[in-house]
Amino acid sequence: MAFYENTIVARQDLAEVELKNIKDKYNEIINNSAGKVIKIEEWGLLNLANKIKNYKKGFYIHYKFEGNNETLNQIKKKIKVDSSIIRHLTVKYKKLDIEYEFFKKDK
């Protein structure tokens, strides 16, 4: 199995409950299709560089997981039909960095 990072950009007009449902839904998809979620990061509402489907902002959810082709196919299939997702990106890694968070808010 290989390591992957998957970043999902959801619409800006979603309620908090809907965001939690999206997060749980894709967590379940990964775990049920021969994968294992290592870490989930919620980056929050961020500005987009360019408008996507008339949205200027999006909620970012970032998954770090271990999986195979079946896992990737399941994620891709579900994202294609999910109208609340405006963009996604999956990147394969040899080794995951689970210590560092890109958009961690220091308090």
Image (tube, rainbow, N blue to C red):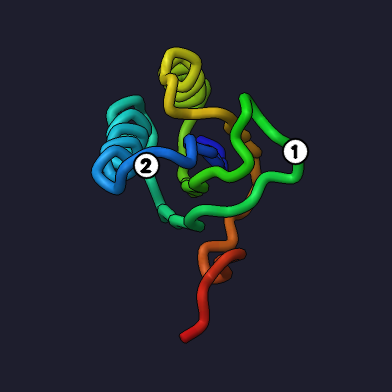
In this image, 91 relative to 63: left or right?
right
Q: Which residue position holds label 1? A: 50
From the top left corner, tell me how far across and down residue 60 is, in percent: 51, 47
Residue 25 drawn above or below residue 99: above
The correct choice, above or below, for 79 with respect to 11 in the image is above
| Image point (30%, 48%), residue name | 16
Disc 2: which residue:
36
Q: Report the mark closest to the observer, 2 or 1.
A: 1
Closer to the camera in the image, 19 or 79: 19
Amino acid bearing label 1: Asn
SS label for mark 2: strand
Q: Residue furthest right?
A: 50
In the rendered image, residue 9, in percent from the top left (x then y), is placed at 54, 38
Given residues 41 and 82, the one toward you in this image is 82
Q: Is mark 1 on a helix, strand or loop?
A: strand
Residue 3 in sight from this viewpoint:
no
Residue in the foreground of this view, choosing between 94 and 5:
5
Residue in the image at 59% along x and 30% along y: 87
Marked residue nearer the N-terminal end (2 or 1):
2
Where is residue 27? Give x, y as percent: 33, 39
Going by the picture, which residue comes out furthest to the bottom? 107
Amino acid type at circle 2 is Lys
Query: Can residue 55 be spotted in the picture?
Result: yes
Q: In this view, does 31 lie to the left or right of 41?
A: left
Q: What separation in Å lies between label 2 and label 1 (alpha carbons)?
A: 33 Å
Residue visible at 46% across and 86% down? 107
Q: Residues within 10 Å of mark 1 (few under 14, many from 20)?
A: few
Instruction: Left or right? Give the position of 25 relative to 35.
Output: left
